[in-house]
């Protein structure tokens, strides 16, 4: 369910025609719907109402401060994966005791920051990281709450680049190893063993991998109890998929029911880290057609958004529906929709059937709210897109378009170069 729909052949976000926003704010442009974001959070969070839980929105899916504030106001915590994301979350008003911190490569300054701000817990991904956290905590005189990220070795059946819970992946420690690491953690003076964590992958479209992972975690938590180590939190990570094309992912209610039933008698607070399913379908990327051209082999539609704006098609061969912002008649063609970047891998879609657009037409890449802007870059010295949040019949610019000054702000020409 989202609030992008056609009225009289015009694509609207809530009560505003996308063409009007694009006219005013330029393209490429990310447009998010506040009503959709709020609905997605509320439906997800309510689905777990029957159990003690904390929903921690995964910041990396879309880290704009306004989006973080919006979720924070609805009671969300956050899952962060860097010091930068901790600072973003705090700047958006998220309480430190609602921040969980994951990531395989936490640096000492990042650990110091997290401890100084008093986050809820570190999701620890290796024995060496645990040692460093203990050392930093002793220096600061502040105990660190930790969960160990275990790798349950279940196949989430998603794209290999976004599978994270298989034995061969870099994340977490295997369940076999985990017992030993927990024993060491429990013996450390400055570590409070608080929970267990896993995150098996992203864009998962069936409940069974989640249930399998939780089952393995549950058995393990019981084994730990047998050894006198009691946990307060079970963090199941994120990963619930969305519909980009024809996928039929479980509804939050179905996902929650399966998880809650598997959790059963385990007396722990459940932590969830949804990213994509909260923001993905709440945003689109609006681009303008610059040129069309026909080569001997193919037809190309060249738009002003590129892989630096939305890398998912290039990186994962991901599908985004491409919708004309004004529906029009015309022949349906099969074309590659490409950006201006000097890479053959720069495309939004390949061999896509589309009503032949004219120069100057607007196209919307749908379902671009997650891993869209947050993965964008300045490659080819392109200015990053603006982001707007639509709220009923109004919109707010929540990130202005970059300027040339932004682009070179951190660079200097040394004096020796004259
Ligand atoms: C990316 C990530 C998430 C969110 O994943 P989605 O598929 O966007 O729900 C949650 N937890 C961790 C540790 C992550 O790295």
Image: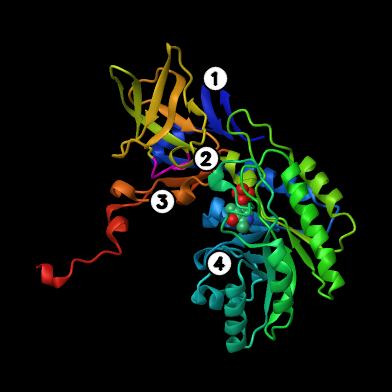
Q: Please tell me whether mark 4 sits on a helix, a strand or a loop.
A: helix
Q: Is residue 173 above or below residue 185?
A: above
Disc 4: CA contacts within 10 A as few (<14), some (14-19) or many (>=20): many
Q: Residue beneath label 1, please? A: 8
Q: Is the CB–ligand 1 distance for label 1 below 8 Å?
A: no
Percent position of residue 218, x then y: 81, 58
Residue at image point 33% right, 35% down? 344
Instruction: Read off the residue under disc 4.
Output: 86
Q: Secondary structure at mark 1?
A: loop
Whether the residues at callouts 4 and 3 have beta carbons within 8 Å, the answer is no
**Residue with the mark numbered 2:** 368
Quarter location, residue 178: bottom right
Quarter location, residue 392:
top right
- Distance between the alpha carbons at the discs numbered 4 and 3: 22 Å
First in sequence, mark 2 or 4: give its number. 4
The CB of the residue at mark 4 lies under 8 Å from ligand 1: no
Are discs 1 and 4 less than 8 Å apart at CB?
no
């Amino acid at each position: 369910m989202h609030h992008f729909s056609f009225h009289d052949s015009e694509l609207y976000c809530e009560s505003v025609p996308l063409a009007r926003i694009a006219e005013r704010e330029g393209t490429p442009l990310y447009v998010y719907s506040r009503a959709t974001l709020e609905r997605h959070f509320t439906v997800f969070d309510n689905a777990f109402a029957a159990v003690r839980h904390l929903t921690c929105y995964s910041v990396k899916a879309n880290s704009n401060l306004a989006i973080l504030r919006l979720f924070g106001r609805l009671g969300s915590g956050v899952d962060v994966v860097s010091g930068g994301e901790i600072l973003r979350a705090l700047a958006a008003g998220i309480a430190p005791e609602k921040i969980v911190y994951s990531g395989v490569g936490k640096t000492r300054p990042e650990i110091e920051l997290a401890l100084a701000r008093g986050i809820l817990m570190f999701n620890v991904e290796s024995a060496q990281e645990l040692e460093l956290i203990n050392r930093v905590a002793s220096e600061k005189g502040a105990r660190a709450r930790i969960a160990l990220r275990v790798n349950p070795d279940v196949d989430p059946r998603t794209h290999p680049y976004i599978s994270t819970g298989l034995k061969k992946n870099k994340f977490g420690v295997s369940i076999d190893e985990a017992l030993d690491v927990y024993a060491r953690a429990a013996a450390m003076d400055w570590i409070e063993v608080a929970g267990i964590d896993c995150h098996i992958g992203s864009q998962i479209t069936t409940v069974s991998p989640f249930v399998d992972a939780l089952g393995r975690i549950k058995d393990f938590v019981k084994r730990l109890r047998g050894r006198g180590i009691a946990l307060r939190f079970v963090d199941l990570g994120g990963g619930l998929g969305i519909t980009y094309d024809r996928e039929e992912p479980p509804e939050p209610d179905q996902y929650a029911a399966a998880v809650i039933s598997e959790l059963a008698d385990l007396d722990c607070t459940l932590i969830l880290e949804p990213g994509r399913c909260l923001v993905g379908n709440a945003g689109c990327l609006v681009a303008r057609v610059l040129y069309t051209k026909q080569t001997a082999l193919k037809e190309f539609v060249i738009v002003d958004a590129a892989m630096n704006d939305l890398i998912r098609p290039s990186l994962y061969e991901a599908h985004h529906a491409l919708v004309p912002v004004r529906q029009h008649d015309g022949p349906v063609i099969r074309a590659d929709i490409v950006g201006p970047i000097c890479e053959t891998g720069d495309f939004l879609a390949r061999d896509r059937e589309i009503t032949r657009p004219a120069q100057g037409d607007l196209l919307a890449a749908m379902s671009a709210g997650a891993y869209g802007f947050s993965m964008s870059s300045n490659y080819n010295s392109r200015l990053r897109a603006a982001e707007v949040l639509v709220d009923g019949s109004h919109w707010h610019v929540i990130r202005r378009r970059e300027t040339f000054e932004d682009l070179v702000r951190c660079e200097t020409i040394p004096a020796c170069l004259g």
